[in-house]
């Protein structure tokens, strides 16, 4: 019987499992797990419908460091481009590979892949979820703040896939999260269910930032937005920039996160992302360590 597990959303791991993953990621980062190669002799597929910097490189490097072989696949270079079904592709991949990382558009594509694959499927990003990013965020916050429970996060900007997964991660780890977003750009309503009352949605970014331990933002213009959508967002999000003024409302030891790529001068200023409170590049590095922990846990 196939007992494989997938990682499609943060809720696929319990709070205790997330804690174990973060501890293991810290082992990888510190070198305490140096030389461990649980993926030796195993090939891991990476099916990427979308362009990528951090997700692709961190997974490729992580798989290699764990002794495995990353196999990068673009749909346009496979029979998916000739209408082979996702179900058939997933079943064939499962005969060659020990796991699959998928980065795609609609979340139902990743879910369908996981349904038909007999090996673990890891969500490298969909339009509604970005769980691998949030594991790295949680690791960064724990490094900087010493704990997760009770930490106050203010997410400023578009209620996108990062915001959705951050809501799930904050709720799992008993953190307090306030999301400040313009009307019409709130996180997905279904994501807000079962969050134990620790998630608040507001309009005013200053109210969200007040007393925050962490300020977090992401790009306003997402992959797939057309010119009209981009122009509308530029107008509606103008007051949602993380800048020195907004940072002054947070705690003096507040850290700033951004999942990158950053559009400097739009959602965040140079002075903040390059400033002493920025943990953005530690956050980017931690993608490597948390993903190695996930791969080790899931790939058998």
Image (tube, rainbow, N blue to C red):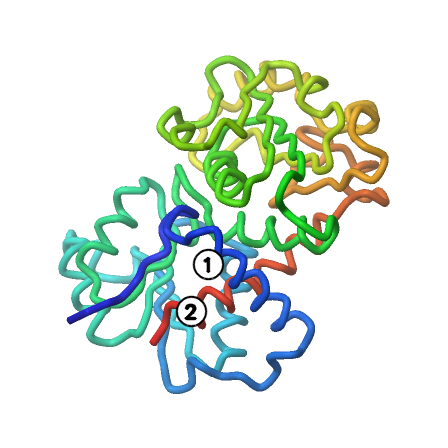
All told, the count of numbered labels is 2
**At x 39% / y 38%, what residue is drawn?**
127
Q: Secondary structure at mark 2?
A: helix
**At x 30% / y 56%, what residue is drawn?**
75
**At x 27% / y 66%, what residue is drawn?**
4
Marked residue nearer the N-terminal end (1 or 2): 1
Name the residue tied to disc 1. Answer: 17
The quarter of the rendered structure image containing the C terminus is bottom left
Name the disc covering residue 297, or none: 2
Q: Is residue 223 left or right of residue 260?
A: left
Q: Is residue 86 left or right of residue 251?
A: left
**At x 84% / y 42%, what residue is drawn?**
275
Front residue of this view, candidates 220 and 292: 292
Circles 1 and 2: CB atoms closer than 8 Å: yes
Q: Is residue 151 left or right of residue 67?
A: right
Instruction: Indicate the quadrant where residue 91 lies.
Output: bottom left
């Amino acid at each position: 019987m196939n007992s494989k597990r997938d990682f499609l959303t943060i809720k696929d791991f319990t709070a205790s499992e997330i804690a174990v993953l973060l501890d293991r990621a810290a082992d990888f980062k510190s070198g305490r797990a140096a030389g461990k190669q649980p993926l030796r002799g195993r090939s891991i597929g990476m099916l990427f419908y979308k362009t990528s910097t951090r997700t692709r490189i961190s997974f490729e490097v992580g798989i290699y460091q764990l002794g495995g072989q990353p196999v990068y696949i673009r749909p346009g270079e496979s029979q998916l481009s000739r209408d082979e079904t996702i179900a058939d592709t997933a079943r064939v991949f499962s005969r060659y590979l020990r796991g699959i990382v998928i980065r795609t558009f609609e979340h139902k594509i990743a879910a369908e892949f996981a349904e038909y694959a007999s090996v673990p499927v890891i969500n490298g990003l969909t339009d509604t979820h970005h769980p691998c990013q949030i594991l790295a965020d949680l690791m960064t916050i724990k490094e900087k703040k010493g704990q997760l429970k009770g930490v106050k996060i203010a997410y400023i900007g578009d209620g996108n896939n990062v915001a959705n997964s951050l809501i799930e991660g904050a709720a799992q780890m008993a953190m307090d999260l306030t999301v400040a977003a313009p009307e019409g750009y709130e996180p997905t309503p279904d994501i807000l269910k079962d969050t134990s009352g620790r998630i608040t949605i507001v309009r005013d970014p200053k109210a969200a930032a007040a007393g925050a331990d962490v300020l977090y933002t992401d790009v306003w213009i997402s992959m797939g937005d057309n010119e009209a959508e981009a122009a509308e967002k530029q107008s509606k999000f103008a007051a949602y920039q993380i800048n020195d003024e907004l940072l002054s409302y947070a705690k003096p030891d507040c850290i700033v996160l951004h999942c990158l790529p950053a559009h400097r001068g739009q959602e965040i200023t140079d002075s903040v992302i390059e400033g002493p409170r920025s943990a953005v590049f530690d956050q980017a590095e931690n993608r490597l360590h948390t993903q190695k922990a996930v791969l080790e846990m899931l790939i058998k």
